Image: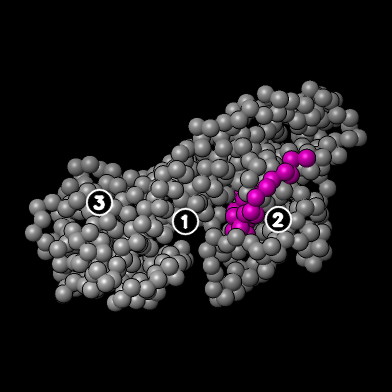
Amino acid sequence: MKLNRVRSRSLLEEGKRKKNMTQGTSISVDGHSLTTDQVVKIARGYERVEITSQALQKVREGRKSVERILKSGKTIYGLNTGFGRLSDVRIKSDQLDELQLNLIRSHAVGTGRSLSVDEVRAVMAVRLNTLLRGNSGIRPDVAQQLQRFLNKGIHPDIPRYGSLGASGDLAPSAHLALALVGEGYVIDESGRKLPTKSILRRKKVSPIKLKAKEGLAIINGTQVMTGLGCLLLNDSNSLLFNLDVAAAMTLEALRGSQASFESRIHQLRPLHGQAHVASRILRLIRDSSLIGTSNRIQDPYSLRCVPQVHGAFLDALQYLNQVLEVELNSVTDNPIIFPETDDVVSSGNFHGQPISLALDLLGVALASASVISERRINKLLSSFNPELPLFLAKESGLNSGLMVLQYTAASLVAENRILARPSSVDSADVSGGQEDHASMGVTSALKARKIWRNTTKVIALELMCAAQAIDLLQNGKLGQGTSIAYSLIRKYTQTVEKDRSLSDDLERVARALENDELRRAIEGTVQL
């Protein structure tokens, strides 16, 4: 079974990741200070994870509270009762460990393609950090098992479908929990799905045995949607950069004006994203001789309103980051233990609505990015600049040129419009009516990932069209940033002299964008 990889990795990067697992830098986790950037480093950079001594002490205090409560003989949901609609069923003291194992076995009913390794690592990092608050009632063994899995590269097989995002991400998290106890499957270094026991033996890791409350504490939380959200946030920031670069190249190819990017305009509407994008475009096109050389009085909205449209995308990303960083350092399971008073409170912190709404906003923002990019493709191909032939074709008629690149972009945009429908407005009534509202947050994340992939392809198509248009202009100098972008695009796709299939070219350019090559090339040279 081959693992789905979000982005390809070079052998050099693979070596760096393995080095980080053994002797690289580490990230301290304490339940209070984890950031989205750190989740990405743990997930993709294989940074080692170290649990602070203060956090372990908090975990011990939470566990002692659970043990005191159990000795009191009180009936407490999740500790000595059934789950969901079965919460009225009291469980005997000698069956409490079996109850937790049964819980994760019964809930591991996920389906679909497995999450990628980086997604699984993000999920584990999130769950580990939230458990370290000490309000979940686990033993240190549980937290340290998650730490061992991360540091030794043991990656549970987690099917992507099954979460409703309400009573936590139950089904996918149960597959994670199965691996911690030595059951289920893991994904090895080559992407094969293998029984967990064989990998644990190879890695010299012993399975843990769950005690009262621990199975519930592992699966009852928003770790899947939050982990996926952290990776999406990182990749969407890169996508926005690529979108800005594509817009800048198209602006040059169409000899557009830079007037609408002037800072004094954006001071009159002081939205952070709008001003930031306008400033970045100006830096990308600095020293260009093509800008402002048409006879148009006004540019079309897809050029003139780039700061407003792209800027709104950036503002959405900042909101998502804010929500995720709160969630990363929050207690999100149920019931919640208050060790200082031995109180156990059933509540709803496992409900993923805040994350689901933010991820739905991301999906809308990504889809909107594809829409404006496709509109610029249309302008490039339709002789909007009279210097450019229709469809950017040399010997048009005999050659169709880049005509069908817009068709492909339009088809991707059409799918994005469908996928952008919010999942957070949906719901489900499960567990015999006890759990009667759901966030569908994991669905929001999975849809946003698909929109991200589609939009990356649309931006790649715009860059290909812009590069072809620039080749067809008689003269002119590109800006400081766009000249670097042009050179990178030409590394993966050559000027179209005569009609040929461009499918492989598209895949190469899109892969370069996914791997963040464009940002690295420009930021290494141009002050942005």
Q: Circle 2 — which element? A: strand
* Front residue (pair 76, 489): 489
Residue reaching furthest right? 94
Q: Residues within 10 Å of mark 3 (few under 14, many from 20)?
A: many
Residue 373 picture location, percent across and down: 32, 54
Identified at 68% across, 67% down, the residue is 189
Quick check: marks 1 and 3 in contact, CB under 8 Å? Answer: no
Q: Is residue 420 above or below residue 344?
A: below
- Magenta highlight on residue 124: yes
CA gap, disc 2 to disc 1? 24 Å
Front position among marks 3 and 2 = 3
The quadrant holding residue 433 is: top right
Residue 314, label in figure: none
CA gap, disc 3 to disc 2? 44 Å
The quadrant holding residue 387 is: bottom left
Mark toward the start of the polypeptide (2 vs 1): 2
The quadrant holding residue 3 is: bottom right
Quadrant containing the N terminus in the rendered view: bottom right
Q: Which residue is mark 2?
A: 156
- Magenta highlight on residue 58: no
Q: Which residue is mark 1?
A: 453
Task: Kindly report the secondary structure that dominates the magenta region of the rendered protein.
Answer: helix
* Front residue (pair 247, 203): 247
Q: Which residues are magenta?
A: 106-129
Q: Which residue is mark 3?
A: 302
Residue 166 picture location, percent across and down: 61, 34
The amino acid pointed to by label 2 is Pro
Identified at 79% across, 29% down, the residue is 82
The amino acid pointed to by label 1 is Arg
Query: Can the viewer see residue 58?
Result: no
